[in-house]
Amino acid sequence: MRAHVAAGFALTIGIVCLGARADATPQDLFGLGARTFSMGGTGTAFCNDYSCVHANPAGLSRVDQTSLTLGYAGASFGLRTTRFGGVDTHFGEDILRATIVGIATQLPVGLRDPYRLVLGIGLFLPINLIGRDRVLDANAPQFVILPDRAQVVGLQAGAGLSLPGGFRIGAGGSALAALSGSLFVTADSAGRVSWRIDDRLVVSYSASVGASWERGPIRVGIVGRTPLVGHLDVRITARDLGINLPPFNIAGTPQYDPWELGAEASFAHTGWTVALGAIMKFWGFYPGPLEATTTQSDRPPPPQFSHTVVPRVGVEHHWRWATSHAAVRAGYAYEPTPAPLPTAARAYMDNDRHIVTAGLGVGGRLRGTLMQVDVFAQLHALAPRTAPADPGTPAAIPAVREYSFGGTVLMLGATLTVSL
């Protein structure tokens, strides 16, 4: 009996670990830094603080004072599906609560103007967790990209170097934790069950490079990022339990940022800054959230994602006085979905998103120290989509009835920056 219970336990663990999702990192979803948060995700051309570690590491070289940023952000995901007939399903997600930390400082390497080398670090730290995966089969309707994207630690660092002629270059990287390990369950001749667990948090990395050029009020920038992939790989083996169970290979890609290539131009004049850019996201290389669980199970269907281009626009107006300043910001981005319409076997839901942003910043000098407070907000409105019934569904898979899906994502936050 104990062996049978242990076998059931091993099977349950296998099912629980099954739900890796195609989630990505918070900086890919929201951006990083108050100006980026507030200006539609722009910043590749004009960023000038720690947020450049994501927007464009070349912009770090604009930093001329050591600065420390501390902040707090929260987000709620109001996602839902509506089946024709009036039945709503709400995908209630935990509200994101995270701290934000940013550091930028010039490195004392003896360079002379116009050369300047600046190091930056950016952290987006969800409270009480490192990362989270969900338990869903491929044929269960699910928002495959949005819900858990921000529920993971975002860590980025970079360095930027200024060059003659208004040129700047920079490079950086991101780190992401993933789970790898094994669970071994066995029973001895007396029926006593034992198990051994060996789990490890492993780190994966991605790289980013950027360049910018400026002359007078005009700035242009480009940035490229390699994929950031958090792979889940847990192997479950059960032996001598009285039931012949195959090894469970719980594997997939719970966190994924695609290859990205962005370009942007900005123009600054009489207190106004206007930026226009776009970023191409190579989602077509995404391998899918799940792999086959056992040698006897079918491989989940490929996601069939496609590449996307995300246009962005941002605007800011500054007022400056003798020892203080203020700014208002707004922006918009349109993020098309890379996902095709769901099917019965691949019920991955995702929507085009209209992203509206706004923010306010005020600052001044207090006893010689420059301090600035920024508040920001983002509203992601999901354009409704309808998944039709799939007449070609195999008999072994329950047919998916026609339904629509959409919702909103709201993010709010504030930061305090101290510059020395």
Image (spheres, rainbow, N blue to C red):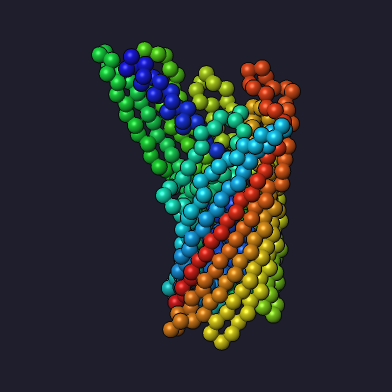
Horizontally, is 124 left or right of 83 in the view? left
* Above or below: residue 304 compared with residue 382: above
* Above or below: residue 25 compared with residue 48: above
Instruction: Say how many tags the image has.
Output: 0
- Image coordinates of residue 413 in percent, x first then y, are 53, 61
- Image coordinates of residue 330 in percent, x first then y, are 66, 65
* Above or below: residue 259 compared with residue 318: above
Residue 68 appears in the rendering: yes
Position of the N terminus by quadrant: top left
Residue drawn at point x = 57 percent, y = 56 percent: 411
Residue 24 appears in the rendering: no
- Image coordinates of residue 237 in percent, x first then y, are 39, 23
Decide which of 186, 148 is in the foreground and name it: 148
Residue drawn at point x = 49 percent, y = 39 percent: 133
Residue drawn at point x = 36 percent, y = 19 percent: 5
**The residue positioned farthest toward the front in the image shown:** 86
- Image coordinates of residue 334 in percent, x first then y, are 70, 53
Horizontally, is 205 left or right of 270 in the view? left
Position of the C terminus by quadrant: bottom left
**The residue positioned farthest toward the bottom in the image shown:** 322
Residue drawn at point x = 35 percent, y = 26 percent: 184
Decide which of 168, 94 is in the foreground and name it: 94
Q: Quadrant of residue 11?
A: top left
Decide which of 280, 238 is in the foreground and name it: 238
* Above or below: residue 59 compared with residue 9: below
